[in-house]
Amino acid sequence: MLASPLLAFQDVWKTYGRGEAKVHALAGVDLAIGKGEFVAIMGPSGSGKSTAMNIIGCLDTPTAGSYRFQGVDAGRLDRNRRAVLRNLYVGFVFQGYNLLARTTAAENVELPLIYRGVPARERRERAMAALADVGLAGREHHTPSELSGGQQQRVAIARAIVTRPSLLVADEPTGNLDTARSHEIMELLTGLNSELGLTVVMVTHEADIATYAQRTIRFLDGHVASDTSNLEMA
Amino acid sequence: MIWETVRLALRSVRRNVLRSFLTLLGIVIGVAAVIAMITIGSGTTEKVKTDISKLGSNLLVVRAARPDRSGSTSFTARQLDDKDVAGLAKGLDDAKAVSAAAQKTVRVVYGAENVAADVTGTDTEYFTARDWGVAEGRLFTESEVRSGTNVCVIGETVRQQFFGAGDPDGQSIRVNRMSCKVIGVLQTKGFSGFGQDQDNTVIMPLAAYQRRIAGDRDIDTIYVAARDGVATARVQENIETIMRETRRIAPDGEDNFSVRDMTQIADAMASATTTMTGMLGAVAGVSLLVGGIGIMNIMLVSVTERTREIGIRLAIGAHEKHILIQFLVEATVLSLFGGLIGIAFGLGLAAAASYSLSIPFAPSLAVVLLAVGFSALIGMVFGFFPALRGARLDPIDALRHE
Ligand SMILES: Nc1ncnc2c1ncn2[C@@H]1O[C@H](COP(=O)(O)OP(=O)(O)O)[C@@H](O)[C@H]1O
Ligand SMILES: [Mg+2]
């Protein structure tokens, strides 16, 4: 299907618990996402979306099956190797922003660069640039409590892209925002996708948010129920 | 990277000043105790040394030996007596002074005032041997010593207590039901190395002391001052030979007396100080342990409180070791803080003690550095388990944590 996918699931299973209480959060998922794609993942609650996102973002590993990311068998890497992979190639955006409290926007954005050993000066410059990219120039020294929800999510996006990752993983990035703010965030993500060629995988419950993506994958009971291109439909 | 971590740790300590301080109390007390104790201890040792050099390194002290502590019963002590003194006075060529003295603490009364003072009975040579004299009045004479006249010289403390600014000369004080005429006031000597007030003293002729105060003819100490330029070791040998002859000890018999010079006495005192330091050190050690457990406790709280933060850091690419180092540094900074406060307290305490005991204030850089190092070590050791717990968190669970 794709010549060289950025990431690929091959018969991925994720099982929680044992015996009677056994739950298959993912039950044989096959799926590939290419470089530069913008994919929306939808599905009812409990269908396995977050579980799949955790594996995509190299936070978690499959119980069975293989997950390849950036050409490596990421499902078999240990914690620290996956940490390196995340630091180099993945940016995360969460529903609840997940910024460090009482820490300025600039410091939050610098954080992933610290773990990469980037010198302080360069870190600062790159953080400033990333904040400018998300439209927060002038807010660098505000702490999260001094910023609105939409602004906090922008800081989180700046933190995700400051390392110039190849993949942005966003689990319900607009879940806590009102409609106007949600669309602003989506415009921003779309821009990053088209301008930087950043691959975006995003979970959402809202159909109009999903329309920003080029492709929608629907989960149901741990399976991929449908995988459609929004472009063809349009 | 390390600097970042230290800054982060400082910030986290600053955010919880009160909690941090309470946590640190154990470390503060432990370090303060160690610092105060060692500083006071070395001040005491210094004081003992200077006292002894003031006494003169040429002074030798003869005492009736007590059976030694190992429980050896092969000899019993024999009190010193007139014959020992006479033997030494006659036989020693290298002695500048040979003095017999007996001493005990006795209640001394003047009018309505009374005070417990060190009362010494001795001869005129005593003042030569101890290089001591009067500031006012006069010392007692040879003939007063021979006849055991009821006269005495008093120390500055006793004078203050009884006479204030008044003139003590010719007044009668009561020493243990014996009436005694004050003829002089001694030069002040201050506190001894053990914090004993050497001016709280009354000195009188030996015979008067023996008759009216001790009620026996025992001599506690014979002081021998070696002539200037003569090695004390040689005088010490001569004293031993003469004493053995006087006491008719068989060639294979053990000494029933002891002769020590001031350096030996200083060493004995210093070793007593060391023992005391060791014991207090154990107490301080326990409080440092308690402090360490406090650090561990607070770090566990900190790790739990910041589980979500750890999740974020792990998600964006922190290694286990980054988280481990972050919390280890925080524990170390916290503990170092406690150590520094403890050092300040300890030195303050030692300075106050030095002032009131009038011993030198002798802070040691080495000890301070050791305390700094030790408190850092405590932070690292006791911070390790909580830090490891933070580092091992699963990022997904940690991110879900409320
Ligand atoms: N850590 C876990 N332990 C046990 N069960 C889990 C765990 N995480 C997810 N599950 C279960 O796996 C299924 C899929 O969950 P999830 O991927 O979070 O769904 P979604 O994000 O689509 O709502 C659910 O039934 C959920 O209860
Ligand atoms: Mg979910």
Image (spheres, coloured by chain):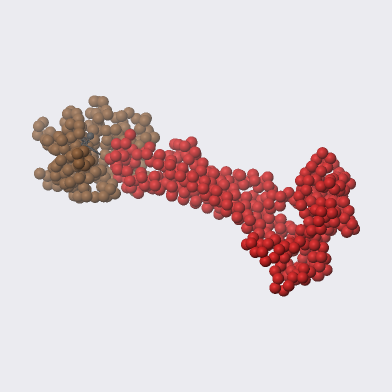
Chain colours: A brown, B red
Q: Quadrant of residue B159?
A: top right
Residue at 79% from the left image edge and 42% from the top image edge: B114
> Residue B178 location in percent, x, y?
85, 48
Q: Is residue B271 above or below residue A16?
A: below
Name the image quarter holding the C terminus of chain B.
top left
Q: Nearer the viewer, residue A223 or B281?
A: B281
Residue at 88% from the left image edge and 59% from the top image edge: B146
Whether residue A214 is visible here, answered yes or no, is no
Residue at 75% from the left image edge and 63% from the top image edge: B78
Q: How many marks?
A: 0
Q: Residue furthest top?
A: A179
Q: Is residue A178 above or below residue B371?
A: above
Position of B360 with respect to A166 (left or right) is right
> Residue B21 location in percent, x, y?
49, 39
Q: Can you tell me which quadrant of the image ligand 2 is in?
A: top left
Q: Residue furthest bottom?
A: B251
Q: Nearer the viewer, residue B227 or B242?
A: B242
Residue at 37% from the left image edge and 33% from the top image edge: A143
> Residue B174 location in percent, x, y?
84, 45
> Residue A139 location in percent, x, y?
35, 33
Position of A208 with respect to B182 (left or right) is left
Q: Residue furthest front?
A: B73
Q: Nearer the viewer, residue B299 or A155?
A: B299
Whether residue B254 is visible here, answered yes or no, is yes
